[in-house]
Amino acid sequence: MKKWEENIRKVSPYVPGEQPQTGDVIKLNTNENPYPPSPGVYEAYCAVDFGRFGLYPDPVSGDLVRALEKYYGLREGQVFVGVGSDDVLSIAFQTFFNSDRPILFPDVTYSFYPVWAAMYRIPYECPPLDENFRIRPKDYRRENGGVVIANPNAPTSIGLARGQMEEILRANQDVIVIADEAYVDFGGETVLPLLDRYENLLVVRTYSKSRALAGMRIGFAMGNERLIQALGDVKESINSYPMTRASVPVGVASLEDEEYFREHLRMVMDTRAWSKGQLEKRGFQVMESQANFLFARHPEMSGEYLFEQLRERKIFVRHFSGERIKEYLRITIGTDAQMERLMAALDEIIPDLF
């Protein structure tokens, strides 16, 4: 090793789902929304003033912040926005987790959490999910430097009830508790009603899943004014221009067509229910999902084998190598036609084993 290499920070990076570069695949591996955003979003995008692209955007993305405060019934100063929820969560880790006590998050959860913890040299511990892949609130009643709960959890798709989340909050009022609600719109139970009761609660959301805007990178956090101010102070110390001139009006427009939003949530959830039933008919064990994906295993064949066989048929799902979940597939809910193609492919694959 060269002497200068000793000072290079060494981390195991987050590995995202594969992004195929051809258009002839069915992409069910990164939990994107299969439907386009509302027509109002398209109109807002087309109306963006191209002539102002040479100017820096509003450093606080004020129009989007105010729209989010109004939409969620919050006070001024209770919303922070960032370039996707990963940006928001990364800044939250830097802002709030600075003690020598370990932060807590489950052993099976969003795999970016340990990456950030390692990157920012934050000690952490991972209470194990129970045998049914559920978070046990009692495991978070111990000394710690903060708590992060993805609710609904990923990749398991299972959510905690608000009362269970409050149990965790009651036991951890001296540290920051982050509720990562990336998938909550698909049937989870939000903790937003608890914001005024717990000043240490930060709720993080994204436009990438339920609002079909993964390509625009819009994330946000909601909490009391002191938490939001602290996030802003850290953000301003790293990169003071969080959102682009195009993403802000698009984000505002998405909030203005509630009927379209709710209808397309229902479409995804209806397809999720159908897909779960179809997988179970084919012998799969499928978790009860409150997200826009299913977490499933077949008792007679390996997850890796299924993953590879589907990939050969140009159907991309997600497979993880972790010991507890290596036999499972995480399957994003696509359109009805895409899910029918998935089932047809499984019908080709399964008999090959017998």
Image (tube, rainbow, N blue to C red):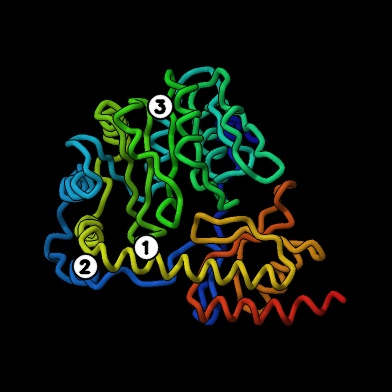
Is any atom of residue 237 visible in this view?
no
Of residues 181 and 316, the one drawn nearer to the viewer in this rendering: 181
6 displayed left or right of 324: left
- Residue type at mark 2: give it: Tyr
3 displayed left or right of 58: right
Of residues 78 and 94, the one drawn nearer to the viewer in this rendering: 78
Q: Residue at x 22, y 39 (%)?
A: 74
Label 3 belongs to which residue? 96
Label 1 belongs to which residue? 215
> Could you give the CA–CA distance between mark 3 and mark 1, rounded to whole angstroms?
28 Å
Residue 11, percent from left and from top: 58, 39
Q: Residue at x 28, y 40 (%)?
A: 80
Q: Quadrant of the N terminus?
A: top right
Label 2 belongs to which residue? 45
Picture quadrant of residue 281: bottom right
Residue 165, percent from left and from top: 48, 35
Q: Residue at x 45, y 31 (%)?
A: 166
Q: Residues within 10 Å of mark 2 (few under 14, many from 20)?
A: some
Picture quadrant of residue 141: top right
Mark found first going from the N terminus, 1 or 2: 2
> Could you give the CA–CA distance between mark 1 and mark 2, rounded to whole angstroms?
13 Å
